[in-house]
């Protein structure tokens, strides 16, 4: 019992010490000239996130906006993020619809099965539905690429790339 009490006391002391302010040495002083991010004030403001895009508050803890040489700029990443969010919302609605209302007429019932098993059942029974869906998504993706290219060029004209240090 005494060991358990000592363990709990040391854990409580560690937690208390973690939140006490540290004493800074006066022998070294450092001045940070980089602006701090609005979203994460303990990190520096990313160079490319200057607030010119809607909703830009400097949130980039992984440094994805600074990646070079992959053929994607900040505008492309913004469009990709919006598309992924919309697809995730549609997937959520689809899952909730199937769970609440059951499958569509003529499709296999998916209760208690893996979603991949249901997919392969649909592929076996109705491969033309899968092919039609893939064709539809390909056309939509191609049209969205055509629609975003002029906007991307216009944005690049107003916001030239940041100079490399």
Image (cartoon, helix red, strand yellow):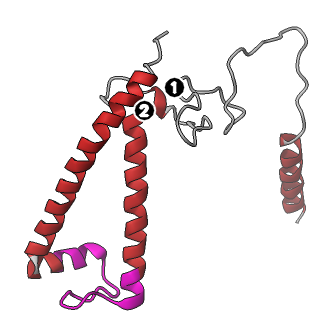
Is 118 part of what is drawn in magenta?
yes
* Marks 1 and 2 close (CB-CB < 8 Å): yes
- Closest to the observer: 29 or 105? 105
- Closest to the observer: 7 or 57? 57
Percent coordinates x, y for residue 47 in the rendering: 55, 22
- Closest to the observer: 25 or 32? 32
- Looking at the rendered image, the quarter that the N terminus falls into is bottom right
Q: Specify whether 84 is left or right of 14.
A: left
Residue at which label 1 appears? 48
Q: From mark 1 to mark 2, how far is it between C-alphas?
A: 8 Å
Q: Residue at x 35, y 36 (%)?
A: 151
Q: Residue at x 10, y 79 (%)?
A: 126
Q: Is residue 39 above or below residue 65?
A: below
Q: Is residue 129 above or below residue 63?
A: below
Q: Specify whether 156 is left or right of 122.
A: right
Disc 2 element = helix
Q: Residue at x 25, y 43 (%)?
A: 145
Neighbor class of circle 2 (other Cα within 10 Å; few <14, some 14-19, many 20+) is some
Q: Is residue 8 above or below residue 111?
A: above
Chain part drawn in magenta: 97-121
| Residue 88: numbered disc | none
Q: Specify whether 111 is left or right of 141.
A: right
Percent coordinates x, y for residue 119 in the rendering: 21, 74
Percent coordinates x, y for residue 37 in the rendering: 67, 31
Residue at which label 2 appears? 74
Neighbor class of circle 1 (other Cα within 10 Å; few <14, some 14-19, many 20+) is some
- Closest to the observer: 23 or 135? 135
Residue 93 in which image quadrant: bottom left
């Amino acid at each position: 019992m005494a060991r358990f009490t000592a363990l709990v006391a040391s854990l409580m002391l560690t937690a208390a010490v973690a939140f006490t302010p540290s004493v800074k040495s006066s022998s070294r002083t450092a001045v940070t000239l980089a602006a701090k991010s609005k979203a994460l004030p303990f990190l520096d403001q990313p160079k490319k996130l200057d607030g010119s895009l809607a909703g830009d508050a400097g949130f980039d803890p992984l440094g994805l906006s600074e990646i070079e040489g992959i053929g994607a700029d900040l505008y492309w990443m913004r469009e990709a993020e919006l598309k992924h969010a919309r697809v995730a919302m549609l997937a959520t609605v689809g899952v909730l619809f199937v769970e609440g209302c059951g499958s569509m007429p003529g499709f296999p019932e998916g209760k208690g099965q893996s979603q991949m098993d249901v997919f392969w059942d649909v592929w076996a029974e109705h491969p033309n539905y899968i092919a039609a869906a893939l064709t539809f998504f390909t056309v939509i993706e191609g049209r969205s690429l055509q629609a975003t290219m002029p906007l991307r060029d216009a944005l690049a004209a107003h916001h030239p790339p940041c100079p490399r240090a």
